[in-house]
Amino acid sequence: MRYSGPTRLLHWLLVPLLWGLFGFGKYLGNIEPSVSNVHLWGWHKSVGLSVFALIFIRVVWRLTHKPPEHVGVSPLQHHAAQTVHLLLYVLMVLTPLFGWIASSATGLPISIFGLVNVPLIGPEGEAAERLFFQLHGLSATALIILSIGHLAAALFHHFWRRNGLLGRMWL
Ligand code: HEM
Ligand code: HEM
């Protein structure tokens, strides 16, 4: 049994987008804003919010569609996988949400590629800005570390245990 087409498509679309946004965000955290690069912050927010929309669709799809049963894994492994997957979903929602709240705290308008303005959410002010940018960075880092553990577990099952696990999610 495999995951449904939309689940597989969204899973693989989001892998490079999330890892890419992480690298992009870290890059922004290490440069000084200037007239020539200030648009990069707008791009990060635009791509981040578009990715948030994909994550929203993915979560709704997941809540309305049961995943295929695990076969040939111990109950412990099954529960460990379930826990990691749940945490990945939670972090996928929290990371862009914190980014959105943090950016709103600056009071500057937020748009998606200049096409639509999104509402500012959460409190305004320097304290909120600092707190939520910190939470944004922390949850993004937790998401990436956990996804690397998840990648390692998937490869271990597929190539070491030879139980074809990757086939369940492969396109
Ligand atoms: C899942 C999607 C996202 C990921 C993985 C991500 C990741 C990151 C990371 C890793 C950083 C650097 C944090 C640090 O080291 O302090 C960052 C910075 C930033 N993020 Fe995101 N982000 C995402 C979505 C968003 C969204 C939706 C917004 C706003 C609408 C946003 C706004 C920002 C801003 C403005 C910064 C720059 C902070 C600075 O100048 O230091 N991000 N992001
Ligand atoms: C940002 C990176 C990633 C995230 C956020 C992520 C997230 C997830 C989530 C949430 C699930 C559970 C699906 C569900 O039950 O609804 C899942 C399943 C899966 N992922 Fe990933 N994933 C990432 C990267 C990868 C990579 C790089 C691989 C490949 C080696 C991979 C292979 C799999 C496999 C094989 C499953 C099915 C596991 C099973 O049937 O128990 N994932 N992933």
Image: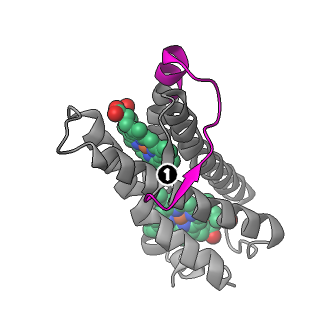
Residue 75, compared with residue 68, is above or below; it is: above
The image shows residue 87 at horizontal and vertical percentages of 63, 46
Query: Which residue is located at x 63 percent, y 84 percent?
Result: 5
Q: Which residues are magenta?
A: 113-132
- Residue identified by numbered label 1: 111
Is 94 or 118 nearer to us in this picture? 118
Q: Is mark 1 within 8 Å of ligand 1?
A: no
Toward which corner of the image does residue 164 lie, by quadrant? bottom right
Q: Quadrant of the N terminus?
A: bottom right
Query: Which residue is located at x 50 percent, y 56 percent?
Result: 150
Image side of residue 144 versus residue 27, left or right: right
Is 2 or 97 nearer to us in this picture? 97
Tell me if I can see residue 140 in this picture. Answer: yes
Give the amino acid type for the residue marked by disc 1 in the picture: Ser
Mark 1, residues whose alpha carbon is within 10 Å: few (<14), some, or many (≥20)? Answer: some
Toward which corner of the image does residue 121 lie, by quadrant? top right
Count of all numbered marks drawn on residues in the image: 1
Query: Which residue is located at x 44 percent, y 34 percent?
Result: 137
- Tell me the colour scheme of the image: one colour
Tell me if I can see residue 149 in this picture. Answer: no
Is 163 or 54 nearer to us in this picture? 54
The image shows residue 116 at horizontal and vertical percentages of 54, 58
Image side of residue 148 versus residue 69, left or right: left
The answer to whether residue 90 is magenta is: no
Query: Which residue is located at x 48 percent, y 28 percent?
Result: 106
Residue 107, compared with residue 7, is above or below; it is: above
Q: Secondary structure at mark 1?
A: strand
